[in-house]
Amino acid sequence: MPRRPFFDSRATPHPLASLLQSIRLTGDLARFRRRDYVYAAGWDGESPFTPVYQRLRDDPLWTTRALDSRHNLMRDVPDDLLEILLEAVQPG
């Protein structure tokens, strides 16, 4: 597949299995201090991640944030993403 013009020239293709393979978490999920989901809300057209965001934003166990960005948060909204990451590592 040809490289998309909006990606960094150093980018490599994303492994297909990472989009198709389910993750199964085992053990006590309470060991995680917090659960964060960052939603890129600026997609052109319908985002495949909207249903996940809608489900998690109503779940009190999750902290969700919607950023006005396309998929590449590090490029489009680096300050917002940095704020979220710093929040996530702060002692609870």
Image (cartoon, rainbow, N blue to C red):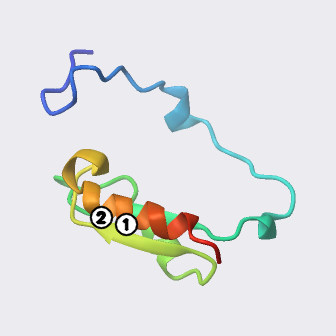
Residue 47 picture quarter: bottom left
Taking depth in this image into account, of 88 and 8 the one nearest to the observer is 88
Image label count: 2
Res 16 seen here: yes
Q: Residues within 10 Å of mark 1 (few under 14, many from 20)?
A: few
Taking depth in this image into account, of 45 and 63 the one nearest to the observer is 63
Q: Which residue extends farthest right?
A: 27
Q: Which residue extends farthest top?
A: 1
How far, Cα to Cα, is label 1 from label 2? 5 Å
Which amino acid, mark 2? Asp
Check whether the beta carbons of the residues at disc 1 and disc 2 lie within 8 A of each other: yes
Q: Which residue is mark 1?
A: 83
Q: Which residue extends farthest left?
A: 5
As drawn, is 68 to the left or to the right of 62?
left
The C terminus, quarter of image: bottom right
Residue at coordinates 28% horizontally, 20% vertically from top-left?
10
Residue 16: horizontal and vertical position, in percent? 48, 26
SS for callout 2? helix
Residue at coordinates 19% horizontally, 54% vertically from top-left?
45
Which amino acid, mark 1? Glu
Residue 27, compared with residue 88, is above or below; it is: above
Q: Residues within 10 Å of mark 2 (few under 14, many from 20)?
A: some
Q: Which residue is mark 2?
A: 80
Residue 74, compared with residue 67, is above or below; it is: above
Question: On residue 70, which mark appears?
Answer: none
Residue at coordinates 21% horizontally, 65% vertically from top-left?
68
